Amino acid sequence: MRTGNTTACQLAFTSLPPATLSAQWLHYPAAGAPTLPNGKPNLNAPAPRTYGGRPDPSGIALWIELFTMTVNKVMVFFRNRVPFVVFPLLAITLQAQWLNFPTPGTPRTPDGKPNLTAPAPRTSDRKPDLSGVWMHEPTPLAEARRLFGQFVDEFAAVDVPGMEAAIQIKYGLDILVDFRPEEALIRPAAVEQMRRNQVLFNSGTVTGCSAGYIVGFPQAGLVSEPIKIVQAPRLTMILYEAGSLGNMYRQIYTDGRALPTEYSLPAYLGYSVGHWEGDTFVVETAGFNDKTTLDALGHPHSDALRVTERFHRRDFGHLDVEMTFDDPKMYTKPFTVKIPHNLVADGDIFEMFCENEKDVAHLPKP
């Protein structure tokens, strides 16, 4: 934090008031937060506990012990404190080494392999536990060739490691691929937006921050990288290995709140709330901006987009995800896609940053 020519280094933790949750829900009273008689959060109340009885550190924290210094002293300050930085860096590096770590609680066959057909795990309140690393089922190459023709063979001929044609899903390229042209789902406004995006691409000025070329939702979950679901009592998070900047995340609130009726700050990933219908986790998301597309083909959406997802864990290793998109500004009616996912057992997602990039120089100029 900088003020004028000073820099504040924040070192100690304290909890922010639970109402400080997001730009849209800044003053929403977080469910379960103890309060004083005047309604303010009681920050000295006992720590909350998880289902397993352990202290729950969930929340938003603020480092409050401030050392203020002029900017020309900052480098000296941190150089003298390198040992405090080394250990977190080591911890980040180690995550990539846990690819084959046998995850505790995973049911196994007699040969030690994960039993993916075992019953789905459940939380202490008997809801299915969706937590895990998940990868969408790929579209068989024969079907992809039928749908997309020569493009698939050209893609397969390159087969970049980690982006092979055999691990792609058809909806990542064209989310409307299941619908016939005569169904006329696309409104003229969507066609015009795709035309403008193409003009921008042909101009050679497209960047990772250009509207219409930012990888957002749902596209980040329909590419070559897995997702990770972390389920907690009042919040479920979906972490994306992919994305325009890599490692995006969505927060799905399950504390009883409803979606706002108005959005003061439309978001790239929208705002999400969830509830259970039997063993199915239903997520409603709205409040999007219009700067991302739904797929690689560039099907656009507007700020009126509303998405309903239904998550059902069939068994330990299989998760069915159904997504319904409703955007009356861009499409004539809601449409639904069903995307089965397989558990990446004993796996994890990686961080993703641009490093050693060698592709752009070889791409054809528009």
Image (cartoon, rainbow, N blue to C red):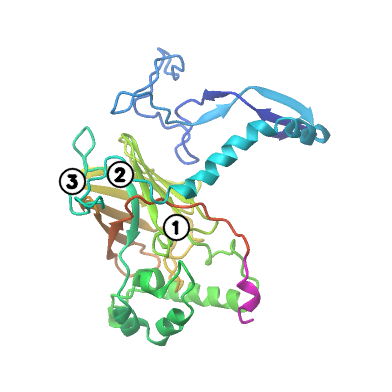
* Residue 147 falls inside the magenta stretch: no
Residue 38, image x and y in percent? 43, 14
Name the dominant secondary structure of the magenta segment: loop
In terms of depth relative to the viewer, which is nearer, 177 or 305? 177
Q: Nearer the viewer, mark 3 or mark 2?
A: 3
Instruction: Identify the residue at horizontal 41%, vertical 50% (top origin).
Output: 348
Instruction: Identify the residue at horizontal 32%, vertical 50% (top origin).
Output: 284
N-term mark: 3 or 2: 2
N-term mark: 1 or 3: 3
N-term mark: 1 or 2: 2
Residue indicated by mark 2: 274
User: From this viewpoint, is residue 175 visible?
Assistant: no
Residue indicated by mark 3: 279
Residue 185, image x and y in percent? 32, 74
Residue 113, image x and y in percent? 26, 53
Q: From the viewer's perspective, tell me whether residue 123 is left or right of residue 288.
A: left
- Amino acid type shown at disc 2: Gly
Label 3 neighbour load within 10 Å: few <14, some 14-19, many 20+? some
Circle 3 — which element? loop
Residue 309, image x and y in percent? 29, 54
Cα–Cα span, label 1 and label 2: 20 Å
- Amino acid type shown at disc 1: Asp
- Amino acid type shown at disc 3: Asp
Residue indicated by mark 1: 303
